[in-house]
Image (tube, helix red, strand yellow):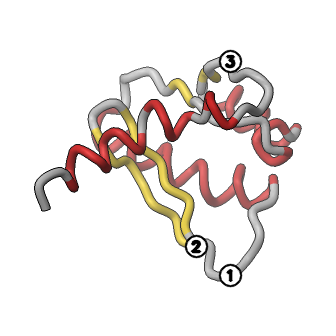
Amino acid sequence: MVVTFGSKTGHVATIPLYGHTVYAEWYATICLPQVDSELCKQNCNRRFILHHNNMSFHTAHITKEFFELNNIELLVYLPYSAELSPDDFYTLPKIKNKLRGQ
């Protein structure tokens, strides 16, 4: 399993899980710093607005602290609804376009 991040311009980072469960400390100390580093390689001055769901590790105190320390903005996310998944808006259309015609 992997955790993957994308932006409006395409793939940003993929972080392997190596068989462990995602939890807040891992997300805030390992995963998000890698994503931030990848984004900084592209352009350190650009705004980082994160759109994710309301999983417990996304809303944990340690995660919120990471966002504040790194000036990461959160896009407001409605309570879970399969019809409003971020993947439906961003990730899946990009994958479909890449695979079209193959």
Q: Which residue is depicted at the point 44% across and 21% down?
A: 47
Q: Which residue is depicted at the point 57% across and 30% down?
A: 50
Q: Secondary structure at mark 1?
A: loop
Write down the residue under mark 2. 1
Question: Left or right: where does residue 98 sit relative to residue 51?
Answer: left
Quadrant containing the C terminus is bottom left
Q: Are marks 3 and 2 in contact (CB under 8 Å)?
A: no
Task: Give, as a three-letter code, the residue at label 2.
Answer: Met
Task: Give, as a three-letter code, the residue at label 1.
Answer: Gly
Q: Quadrant of residue 68?
A: top right
Q: Quadrant of residue 31?
A: bottom right
- In the image, residue 43 sits, relative to residue 78, either above or below, namely below
Write down the residue under mark 3. 76
Write down the residue under mark 1. 19
Question: Left or right: where does residue 38 sit relative to residue 73?
Answer: left
Q: Position of residue 87 (x, y in %)?
A: 51, 40
Q: Quadrant of residue 43?
A: top left
Most distant residue in the left direction? 101
As measured in the structure, the alpha-carbon distance from the residue carrying label 3 to the one carrying label 1 is: 30 Å
Task: Give, as a three-letter code, the residue at label 3.
Answer: Val
Q: Position of residue 49 (x, y in %)?
A: 53, 24
Q: Are marks 1 and 2 in contact (CB under 8 Å)?
A: yes
Graded by Cα atoms within 10 Å as few (under 14), some (14 to 19) or many (20 or more), the crowding at tag 1 reads few
Q: Which residue is depicted at the point 47% across and 48% down?
A: 5
Q: Which residue is depicted at the point 58% across and 30% down?
A: 51
Q: Secondary structure at mark 2?
A: loop
Most distant residue in the bottom direction? 19
As measured in the structure, the alpha-carbon distance from the residue carrying label 1 to the one carrying label 2 is: 7 Å
